[in-house]
Image (cartoon, coloured by chain):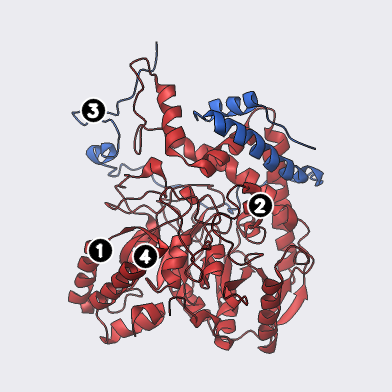
Chain colours: A red, B blue
Amino acid sequence: MSVPAATLRELRGAIRRGDRTAVEVCEEALARIEAHDGALHAFNTVTREQALKRAALIDRDRSKWRDHPLAGIPVALKDNLCTRGVRTTASSRILESFVPPFDATAVSRLEAAGAVVIGKTNCDEFAMGSSTENSAFGPTRNPWAVDRIPGGSSGGSAVAVATGMAPLALGSDTGGSIRQPAALCGIVGLKPTYGRVSRYGLLAFASSLDQIGPLTRTAGDAAVALSVLAGSDPADATSAPQPVPDYSASLTGEVRGARIGVPSRLLDSGVDEEVSGALRTALDALVARGASLVDVELPHAGAAVPVYYLVATAEASSNLARYDGVRYGFRATAAGPEDDLRTMYARTRARGFGAEVKRRIMLGTYVLSAGYYDAYYLKAQQVRTLVRRDYEQAFADVDVVAMPTSPMPAIRIGERVADPLQMYLMDIFTVSANLAGLPAVSVPCGFTAGGLPIGMQLTGRPFDEATILRVADAYERDTRWWGKQPLG
Amino acid sequence: MPVRFTRSDVEAIAGLANLDLDEQEVDLFARQLGDILEYANQVQQIDTTGVPPTASVITRHQVDRADQVRPSLDRAEALANAPDADADGRLFRVPRVIG
């Protein structure tokens, strides 16, 4: 039961039985990183010493940790989640040497469950991107084809799990940033319902859309992780008080009677043929298990991308105003004694932020500015209501909505960097779940002829992660896509 | 409806956003912001008469708590990441603010 090949649940079982120690498991994860991360760049920081020390503690107090759900499990954290005493950069120059004095709640919860943090993963700067090319520290590479993007923005987390460097990683998802890299790397990525997981300690991008979630090899592993992560938190007023079910208990394999909505009109155009083919075959497998397919209309889903980029950039321009070179992060030094505060702010932000972050701050500032607020921001918020209503209507009739996670497999690094709009259009199937606050999971459902992974996205009712995980797990029982790994 | 940004439009937005853009960035953003907003203009075609805006999807729940003093971040820790903290560790130092 070696780390690279094992699922989280298999590893957990091996540690609990005493077949493997937490230190052995940690050493294997670190060795895997050592062997492959030079070529892939999944990690910004590897917390080697700290991880080994923590694993040794868990082995020493075996009886204390025995029944903790993640005891001894190596986890990788997206580098926009605050970790006390460990550099947290958001892959930005402006936070290159920022060392948070506190842990994100999601991180404390993982550690309280016995997890061993092995490092911080690369991402698009401040999670703004769909390719992990917008990192100030260089791109992460797709392990299935190293000249291609791993997706983003949680690309480093997806690569860490796909290559078996860790069986569990955390990402954040504002418009698809967990699900899309999971799809492009051939693993499972879950964006929980807005409010299901505390956002305390997540470096904010767009606060009404951001949500933290797990990347794993299987839906069952995602269920274990979500049971640990979910729950209300006094430090995040938007975290939800709804009770947290045992998500693993919902994985019965039973989908008879489940009604799966397919928005066929939305999928009519703009989807790669191999991607549509894989989705059709995946839906057939669910039908063979007893689910039924229902055509649903999501009339405003086509407008979700522009709505998303108006709302998310507006929120981002406000959230990123805090990076001003005063309390933390990089400061551009004065050009001369005549420098004043405003000059320092503007120079610090110009040198500290990369191109995509500046572009989004500019767009967001514009749509919030006097004279344009009603035409863009308010209008987008109204259409956001229509997107939500589309889903409410669909969920009156179906239990799950299925579509591809990404309209295409992984593109080549550099292919769309010069044309941000083309990059934004790749988010067509993922942004709606954020706008509507719904849970959605991406599950591996095949490969292109060229060997690139394809993902199926299942979206559910608010706080009904149990159903999408049950359907995803049932699908995994009939297929072996989830078991395929790059790097041999 | 094409959306055009002049260099001075872009400079005005950059001023609001406290971003000191260079010449190249001003030209690039003038073009790209125009392209993105032209695309985003499709939302104008959607009838939203009487539709309330969604600012957040959270269902209201009670988040009030007792107003009790609790420990907060230690001052030295709060200042530890500052690029220019006062030598005595008591304040953040910034360049001249007024005249």
Q: Foreground mark, 3 or 4?
A: 4
The residue at which mark 4 appears reads as A37
Mark nearer the N terminus (2 vs 4)? 4
The residue at which mark 2 appears reads as A422
Q: Is residue A396 left or right of residue A451?
A: right
Crowd class of label 3 (few under 14; some 14 to 19; many from 20; radius 10 Å)? few
Q: CA distance from mark 2 to mark 4?
A: 29 Å
Quadrant position of residue A429: bottom right
Badge 2 and badge 1 in a common chain: yes
Amino acid at circle 3 = Asp
Residue at x 35% of width, y 78% of height:
A3
Q: Secondary structure at mark 1?
A: helix
Chain on which label 1 sits: A
Amino acid at circle 4 = Asp
Q: Are marks 3 and 4 in contact (CB under 8 Å)?
A: no
Q: Foreground mark, 3 or 1?
A: 1
Crowd class of label 4 (few under 14; some 14 to 19; many from 20; radius 10 Å)? many
Provide residue A319's location: percent of width, then percent of height. 49, 40
Provide residue B91's location: percent of width, then percent of height. 27, 28
Quadrant position of residue A46: bottom left
Quadrant position of residue A481: bottom right
The residue at which mark 1 appears reads as A48
